[in-house]
Amino acid sequence: MNDVHELLGRVAADAGQPVISTQAVYAGAARVRLRRRVTVSAAALAVVAAGVVAVPGLASGTKPKESSVAAPAELAENTGRAEQLVKLLPKDVGSVEQVSLAVVIKNATPEQAKEDPVGPLDGQYAVRRDGGVGYLTVDLRDAESVVKKFGGLDPAADLCKPTNGEHRPADCVREELPDGRVLTTWSDPMKYGGTPLWGPELVGRLVLKDGGLLAVRSSTGLVSEQAQGPLLKTPPLTRAQMRTLMLSPELLPKK
C-alpha cells in the first residue's frame, strides 16, 4: 500500500507531464511490491488494496487548470450514477455526489479527468454528513484486466491467511459465496504517509465467477490540503452495508 501512495504522490507532482493512467500507477506499484515480496497476498494487495484511487492521466503537454471542488457532480460530468447509487445505499448514509478524485487531488480539468468505466456505477463519490466528507469508490475490472494486474497469480487467494510472513489485513473477513464468488473485506488505517493523506477506511474485493473483480472503498476522507472537508467519524458504509452494496447486481453490467 505504501508503494501505491508513493507513486500517487509522484503523479500529482508531475501534473502536466505525459499521460499517466490509473492503471499505470497501480501496475507500477504492483511491480515495486512484487520485486520486494513476490507472494500472492502482496500482489493482491498491490492491485486492489484500498480499491482504486483514480488518478487519470493528464493530456501530454497540458497543465491542470484552476478549478473549484464546490460542484463535484459537474466536474464528474454529472453522469447520473450518484442518483442510481443512492438507491442502493442506506437512507442515513448522507448526501452523495459523484466526484473525480483526479480533480480533487490533482486539480485536473473535466476533460483530463474523463474515465472509461466498466461497471454501470463505477466511479468516485463524495459522501457528506455531520459536517465531514468521505468517499466511496466503485471499480469493476474484467477478467483480462485482472489477469494483467495479478501477473498470473490467483486473485481469489486468501488475504486473511497470508504466507511468507506477510502482514494480515486488519479485521479481514473472507467469504466464499455459494455461487463461487469470493468476497474479502478488511479495515485499513491508511497510515502510509505521502500525498495525499487518507483517513481510515473499509475495503472490499469481490472476485467474480468469470474472473472479473469488483473493488469498493468506504473511506473517511482526506486529511490533506486537497480535502473537501473534515474526515467522517466513521467510514460512509459499515462492513455489512458494504457487503450488501457489493453483492447488488446493479453494480454489474446487464447480461
Image (cartoon, rainbow, N blue to C red):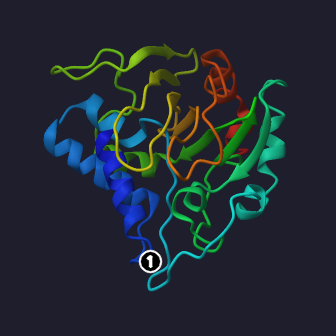
Structural crowding at the residue carrying mark 1, measured as other residues with C-alpha within 10 Å and reported as few (<14), some (14–19) or many (≥20): some
Residue name at image x 30 percent, y 49 percent: 29
Residue labelled with disc 1: 16
Residue 230, horizontal then vertical, whole percent: 62, 37
Query: Up-down: is 161 above or below 107?
Result: above
Query: Up-down: is 208 above or below 90?
Result: below
For residue 122, side relative to residue 14 (left or right): right
Residue name at image x 55 percent, y 37 percent: 214
For residue 7, side relative to residue 173 (left or right): left
Residue 164, horizontal then vertical, whole percent: 15, 21
Determine which quarter of the picture holds residue 247: top right
Determine which quarter of the picture holds residue 125: top right
- Image quadrant in which the C terminus is located: top right
Q: Front-most of 194 and 214?
A: 194
Q: Front-most of 16 and 25?
A: 16
For residue 161, side relative to residue 58 (left or right): left
Describe the element under mark 1 as helix, strand or loop. loop
Q: Front-most of 106 and 157?
A: 106
Report the label total.
1
Q: Front-most of 234 and 99?
A: 234
Query: Up-down: is 122 above or below 19?
Result: above
Residue name at image x 43 percent, y 39 percent: 48
